Image: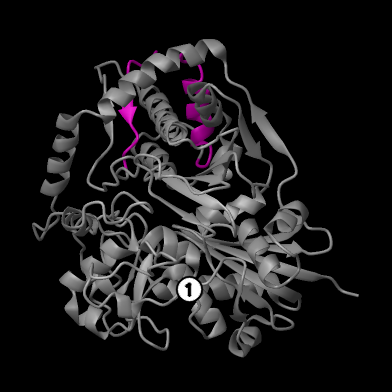
């Protein structure tokens, strides 16, 4: 008898990734990467119209193309029990009542496209909402973020009434993909709680954006079935049977069962283009100071989850490699820089950096804040800068961990996952030394897509719950990094300087002023 399979798809920033999992063995047996044809739309729209600074968009059609590509390559001729979807967040888009996007109708209007998580132009709208609604959002979050759904809805509403008024829905792209696959709208509580401030008691917050409440729908728990893959998709992909499609999940949350974390006491860091940190707890607690959001039963059923993150992580390192090319072959640049930077001692570069190259999430939730390098000299080398950036990312993680502990979160273990974590030992070793505690790196490929497949396993009844899913399909081995005591002492001193910079109001004000002054062509500020 032929085996049955699960498919998990992770819709990331630059591409979508899919894994095929054999149910009997629990192993990944195939893997596909599908690039978005339009990529990240930030400089100009597909028609060539230039965009002001701060835009970060996706074309909705790219999700359909990549989903079809992945499902066909992985599923054709195979009996698929379930399909799981994970995506970046908050990455919302307007849609019609039948689920169609508005890009065909408004191809020249950027407000009709998917606004990626790192889209910066919604920050002023978040600031306005926060100013008028102080303390309203506690205990779920301390303020509206410019990266969240509500701020992006406000931006659409105020800058493009034509798009906003004709849109029947404003929906996270992960939920929209599920809608396209099944033919029915079935939103995820994960996106709703963490990116739109949904409350089980009061629903979505009202009165913040005119018309928004009518464009949202009640969410459903992760691990539940959103429906079956439609006949149209079954026919197009050549999949055998009618697989269950699970409710979508936030990409950083999807990794939890894949890395074997379904119970309290662990901080899980997902190191991608940005970084996300998830803290699980057995009981509700006050949101730690500066953290982004918390919710019960949203990331995983029956468990409390707090979230924090860094707005730029891999993006920051990618900027460095583009800006400071090295003699190494393409694809080997990080190995070259890691080897050189590892020869330096902590502090030897003479530099301190702030890791806010994509804005700040914790503790300010402000996309207008920016990166910073202090200590530049005529003899500063690119290797010095690289080492300082690596250290700044590690300092940012420490700042998040310490805020969590001050908020009474129990952190017994630190787990870091992603291709970056598995492939950059120098980075993880530096993080370990800065934290002064052991770091666990799961030995699992494509953890986010694998996590999405576990969601599919739960939704399809292949496993009874996420704990069983983690046991059958999740990580079984970890690489453990231990801190160096001498380097940790030096990093304690450097971290104190980093923390002082983070708290300097004059520096923060200067960053905001510089961001507000940026213009491209139309003199329109971010």
Dot 1 alpha-carbon crowd within 10 angstroms: few under 14, some 14 to 19, many 20 or more: many
Helix, strand or loop status at disc 1: loop
Which of the pair 372/409 is nearer the observer?
Answer: 409
Q: Position of residue 263 (x, y in %)?
A: 64, 47
Specify the quadrant that holds the N terminus.
bottom right
The residue pinned by badge 1 equals 187
Spot the residue most to the left.
523
Image quadrant where residue 467 sits: bottom right
Image quadrant where residue 232 sits: bottom right
Q: Is residue 522 left or right of residue 426?
A: left
Q: Which residues are magenta?
A: 330-357
Residue 48 appears in the figure: no
Residue at image coords 43%, 65%: 192
Q: Is residue 55 left or right of residue 455?
A: left
Q: Position of residue 427 (x, y in %)?
A: 51, 30
Which of the pair 341/427 is nearer the observer?
Answer: 427
Residue at image coords 30%, 82%: 167
- Magenta span includes 353: yes
């Amino acid at each position: 008898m032929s085996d049955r399979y699960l498919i998990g798809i992770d819709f990331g920033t630059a591409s979508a990734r899919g894994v095929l999992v054999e149910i009997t063995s629990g192993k990944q047996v195939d893997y596909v990467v599908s690039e978005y044809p339009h990529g990240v739309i930030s400089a100009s729209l597909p028609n060539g119209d230039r965009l002001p600074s701060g835009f970060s968009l996706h074309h909705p059609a790219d999700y359909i193309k990549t989903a079809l590509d992945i499902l066909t390559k992985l599923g054709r001729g195979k009996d698929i029990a379930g399909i799981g979807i994970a995506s970046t967040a908050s990455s919302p888009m307007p849609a019609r009542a039948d689920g169609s996007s508005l890009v065909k109708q408004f191809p020249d209007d950027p407000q009709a496209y998917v606004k990626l998580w790192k889209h910066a132009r919604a920050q002023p709208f978040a600031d306005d909402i926060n100013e008028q609604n102080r303390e309203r959002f506690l205990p779920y979050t301390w303020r509206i973020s410019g990266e969240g759904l509500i701020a992006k809805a406000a931006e659409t509403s105020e800058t493009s009434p034509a798009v906003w008024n004709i849109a029947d829905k404003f929906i996270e792209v992960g939920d929209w993909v599920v809608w396209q696959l099944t033919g029915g709208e079935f939103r995820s509580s994960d996106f709703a709680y963490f990116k739109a401030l949904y409350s089980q008691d009061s629903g979505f917050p009202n009165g913040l954006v005119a018309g928004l409440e009518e464009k949202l729908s009640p969410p459903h728990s992760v691990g539940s079935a959103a429906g079956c893959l439609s006949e149209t998709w079954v026919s197009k992909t050549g999949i055998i049977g009618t697989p269950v499609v699970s409710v979508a999940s936030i990409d950083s949350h999807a990794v939890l069962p894949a890395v074997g974390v379904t119970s309290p006491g662990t901080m899980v860091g997902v190191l991608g283009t940005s970084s996300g940190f998830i803290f699980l707890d057995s009981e509700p607690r006050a949101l730690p100071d500066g953290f982004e959001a918390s919710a019960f039963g949203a990331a995983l059923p029956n468990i409390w989850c707090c979230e924090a993150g860094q707005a730029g992580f891999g993006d920051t390192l990618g900027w460095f490699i583009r800006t400071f090319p090295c003699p190494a072959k393409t694809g080997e640049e990080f190995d070259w820089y890691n080897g050189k930077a590892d020869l330096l001692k902590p502090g030897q570069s003479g530099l301190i950096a702030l890791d806010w190259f994509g804005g700040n999430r914790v503790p300010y939730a402000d996309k207008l804040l920016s990166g910073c390098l202090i200590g530049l000299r005529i003899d500063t080398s690119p290797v010095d800068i690289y080492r300082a950036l690596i250290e700044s990312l590690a300092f940012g993680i420490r700042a998040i961990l310490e805020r969590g502990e001050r908020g009474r979160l129990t952190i017994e273990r630190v787990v870091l996952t992603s291709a970056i974590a598995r492939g950059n030992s120098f980075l993880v070793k530096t993080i370990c030394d800065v934290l002064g505690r052991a770091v666990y790196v799961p030995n699992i490929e494509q953890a986010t897509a694998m996590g999405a497949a576990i969601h599919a396993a739960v939704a399809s009844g292949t496993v009874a719950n996420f704990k069983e899913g983690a046991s059958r399909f999740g990580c079984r081995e970890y690489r453990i990094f231990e801190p160096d005591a001498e380097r940790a002492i030096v990093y304690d001193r450097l971290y104190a300087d980093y923390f002082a910079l983070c708290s300097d109001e004059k520096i923060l004000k200067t960053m905001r002023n510089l961001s507000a002054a940026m213009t491209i062509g139309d003199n329109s500020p971010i």
